Image (cartoon, coloured by chain):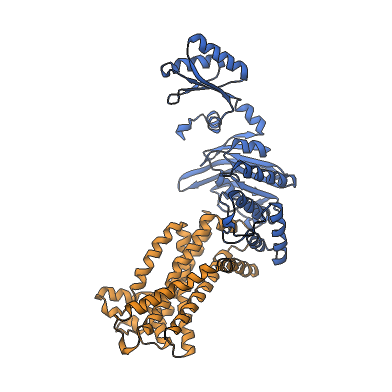
Amino acid sequence: MRWALADGWTVARRDLIHWANQPMTVVFGIAFPVVITLAFGYLFGGAVQVPSGAGYFTFLMPGMYGMTMLFGLSATMISVTTDVSRGVTDRFRSMPMAPSAVLVGRAVADLLHSVLILAGLLACGLAVGWRPESPSGALAAVGLLLLLRFSLLWAGMYLGLLTRDPGAVVAVQTLEFPVGFLSNAFVAPDTMPGWLGAISEWNPLSSTVAAARELFGNPGWGGDSWVAGHAVPMAVIWPVMITAVFFVLSVRRYQRLDR
Amino acid sequence: MTAVLVRDLRKTYGGKVALDGIDLDVGRGTVCGLLGPNGAGKTTVVRILTTLLRASGGRAEVAGFDVATRPRQVRRSIGLVGQHAAVDEVLTGRQNLELFGRLCHLGAAKARARADELLERFGLDHEGPAREYSGGMRRRLDLAAGMILAPPVLFLDEPTTGLDPRSRAHIWRAVRDLVAGGTTVLLTTQYLEEADQLADRISVIDSGRVVAEGTPDELKSTLGGDRLDVVIRDPARLDEAAALISRVTSGAAETDRDTRHVSAPVSGRVRALTDVLAALATAGIEAEDVALRRPTLDEVFLSLTGEGGEAR
């Protein structure tokens, strides 16, 4: 058990050394969502009608926070497939280290990376005038955002171990945007065709974003459906369910690399 | 003492047989070469012995530990140098070795000291990330990573594939040094020369079976010696020439119509050459080119498996 934690940290630490060795990659990682946010806010912001006369950034920021967590899915997948295809995973598996450390290390490293990116985006939000209402609510909102990231981490790990192919990541990356748009992150699901609006409301990303808006004290789109009315509990239930499924699948897939 | 013991090892992937009952005995402190073409099952053997893959049947022990029931102990006793240079490309050579050292539970200080030692020993003084390394340096870094615990048994899966001759010689020298220090090495290769250079005993593998086993000298004598290649100018007389060469060399000559080649195993080198040329001259068949050469790996397999190269 002691080694499981120590080895997990050693594997996670490897990513921290990556950051130190390639600081520009980290800077671009933080800059990407910031640039997207500014583009959305200043280019489309004027065209989107938001309720209660608030600025578009007030709506956009929680949506972008959630969207950034969603992008983590392919980030995790890239790391996993790179290690598998280069033989690094096999080297780990042939060494006398705790076998769990490969997955634990990946989880810790990716979560830390997301904290960094989220911090950058929160700073960007504050700079363009977005404000949370209370520190405790903001903390809870950040917690829920990272909980979503944590659940997608296991999904990314499973997909990475399943495909083992860096090429497959492109497919997932391509799908991240439509899945992100098919939510309440940028526009109200009410404005979409009925069935599309329903899908958007049941998108786990919508629950997290709606819950974050609620906890940050930012106005939301509302909505009459049950799922829209129970954003905070659903922002816990969805990630817990995703984690439960993909954690088991990832561990099993990892253990069965020897088949 | 036996460092690696394999009995009737089998592996099937969804109905496809990869290993069809392999036996191996590798004595402590010796080098065993697994020689075979792509897809023969060499890598599968290595993956099973290094606990990366589960066998479908049979038994395998490394350093006295069963790979199926005591994988932990096996992992403590082995080093693996796979076909990819399995190193982190963003980390420097030193950072890679420190990472793997920590994961071998050496502790931070010892991992650092061991990294320094290995960097010097394998001539890896470049400070940049491993991505900037040449192919040969990457392999040496990989070899160093496999040597962190100075394991008693080292597995090298095609350690020099894709390397230039100088880097290859460098790797060979490093392997010889390790063996001189008492390490047991199991190495796979597609190159007859590499097995010849490094291995004490060679097991030739084809289609998941050991088709020949022995010292390099034993194998060479069973595989027959040199071959004589003759290029015939007139394609119409190819069969006639082949029959003639078969008779003179008393070996089965093979013909290749596209390149107008006749090839036959010979024993006495110069005598066979002069006899064949004399016979061809008498029959009035003109030879465009004549050469004596060592058998290629393809011909080795042909003689061992009795299958044509094209059938594979």
Whether residue B3 is visible: no
Whether residue B146 is visible: yes
What residue is drawn where x is 52% and y is 72%?
A113
Q: Position of residue A219 (x, y in %)?
A: 36, 87
- The orange-coloured chain is labelled A
- Taking the image as shown, residue A196 lies to the left or right of residue B250, namely left
What residue is drawn where x is 62% and y is 51%?
B137
Tell me which corner region of the image, top left, top right, bottom left or bottom right, holds residue A12.
bottom right
**Image quadrant for the N terminus of chain B?**
top right
Display colour for chain B: blue
Q: Position of residue B8 (x, y in %)?
A: 58, 42
Tell me which corner region of the image, top left, top right, bottom left or bottom right, holds residue A184.
bottom left
Q: Nearer the viewer, residue B118 or B290?
A: B290
What residue is drawn where x is 49% and y is 75%?
A117
Tell me which corner region of the image, top left, top right, bottom left or bottom right, holds residue B90.
bottom right
Q: Position of residue B142 (x, y in %)?
A: 62, 53
Q: Is residue B33 above or below residue A161?
A: above
Q: Nearer the viewer, residue A95 or A24?
A: A24
